[in-house]
Every structure is written in C-alpha cells, then in structure tokens.
Amino acid sequence: LPGGGTYDLPDPRGHEATARFVGSTTGTVEGVPVVREWGYLTVRDGVELAFEVIRPDDEGPHPTLLTYDGYYAGGDPDPGYARRYLPRGYALAGLQVRGTGCSGGEFDFFQPAEGTDGHEMVEWLARQDWSTGRIGLVGKSYPGITQLFTANSQPPSLAAIAPGHVFADVYRDVAYPGGIYNHSFAALWSYVA
C-alpha cells in the first residue's frame, strides 16, 4: 500500500467454504465425457460467489485447475483451457470475482478479498471426492492477477500457479499510474462488472 500500510484481511484458514449447486449437465469436450456443475460458493463473510466445474465423467480423482476472474469464469470457464486440459485428465473450475456476473458482494477491482476468496475456493476444490487435492491456478491478465492474490494467502492445497500478463505493481501500474487515479480503467471495469 502507499505509505507502507497493510490490509487487515480475515484469515480464511479455519473456515470451510460451502457450496450450493444449482445445476449440472453432461456432455463431451474434445471427445472426453464430462460433467458440468455450477452453483455458488459461500465464503467466510456469507457472500456467494458463482462457480462452474467441468470434470471428466469417471471415477477420478483428477488434478484441478482454477481460473478466477471478473469476466465470466464462474459461468463458463475458459473453453480453450477445457479443450487443452480435460483430455489430459484435469478438472477445470471457474470462479467469478465478488460483485461481478452472478457473484454477490461488491466489486472493487483488485480488492484484498480476492486473495481470501481464491484461498477458500482452492481449499473447497481440494476437498471434493473427484479431486486429487492438488490445485493449480491458470490464466492471464485479470485471472493472472487473482493468482498472485490467492497465492499470497498460501492455501495449503495450492500446488502451482501460472500467471500470465500480470503487472509488477497493480496499484502503481494499473489503478493509479503515476499516482493519478485511472478513471478510464475503473469506468471500463464498472461497465464490465
């Protein structure tokens, strides 16, 4: 933070997020039979975050990749990742940032809650019967940045991150370049969210 301050974040350790499923379907991705399940993850402050899981329709377990963003990951995780990783035996999950899409809560881009929300999703995924318990994060741009926030909270089940197209200092390089509020970027995100 500017001036060396810190965020007072709730510690997600010790809280087990719960899920409310609202739908499921079966299909195929690149010839692989899959199950798609979607619903809401309830995190430590009661906010419900939209998610979707696409996993091979078999006995499992499967290593799981998570993409987490303010676009539409909670409603349709990256189809390119699905085509690439499901045939290789991975499950793919998408989580929608709070206050965007169908997720509850308030949106404030690059808010500290993104790390703790991501932490809770990683640990929820790791507890699923179809999961190996080893979770990786994938994505570029916003999904790359949320990986850094999530990894900073040190979820025990996080095995790897692969952030692409991220900034060295999101506050300085995006939100307040040169110390001046980036109204254009914020206005775009308020429209997108």
Image (spheres, helix red, strand yellow):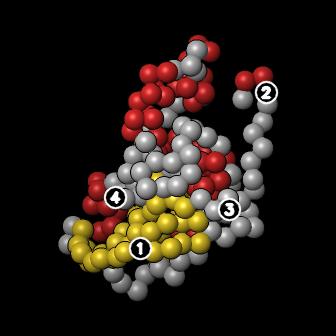
Q: CA distance from mark 4 to mark 2?
A: 38 Å
What count of labels does the image hold?
A: 4
Q: CA distance from mark 1 to mark 3?
A: 20 Å
Secondary element at image label 1: strand
Secondary element at image label 2: helix
Secondary element at image label 4: loop
Earlier along the polypeptide chain: callout 1 or callout 4? 1
Amino acid type shown at disc 1: Val
Amino acid type shown at disc 4: Asp
Amino acid type shown at disc 3: Arg
**CB within 8 Å, label 1 to label 3:** no
Mark 2 sits on what residue? Answer: 4
Q: Is residue 136 left or right of residue 157?
A: left
- Please state, as top left, top right, bottom left or bottom right, where the N terminus lies in the image: top right
Q: CA distance from mark 3 to mark 2?
A: 27 Å
Count residues near mark 4 (Cα–Cα under 10 Å), then give few for <14, some for 14-19, many for 20+: some
Looking at the image, the residue that sits furthest to the left is: 31
Disc number placed over residue 22 in the picture, else none: 1
Residue at image point 39% right, 46% down: 71
Q: In this view of the protein, which residue sits in the foreground, 171 or 148? A: 171
Q: In this view of the protein, which residue sits in the foreground, 161 or 152? A: 152
**CB within 8 Å, label 3 to label 4:** no
Q: Is residue 152 left or right of residue 110?
A: right
Q: CA distance from mark 3 to mark 4?
A: 24 Å
Residue 19 picture location, percent across and down: 54, 72
Mark 3 sits on what residue? Answer: 44
| Image depth: mark 1 or mark 4 in front | 1
| Image depth: mark 1 or mark 2 in front | 1
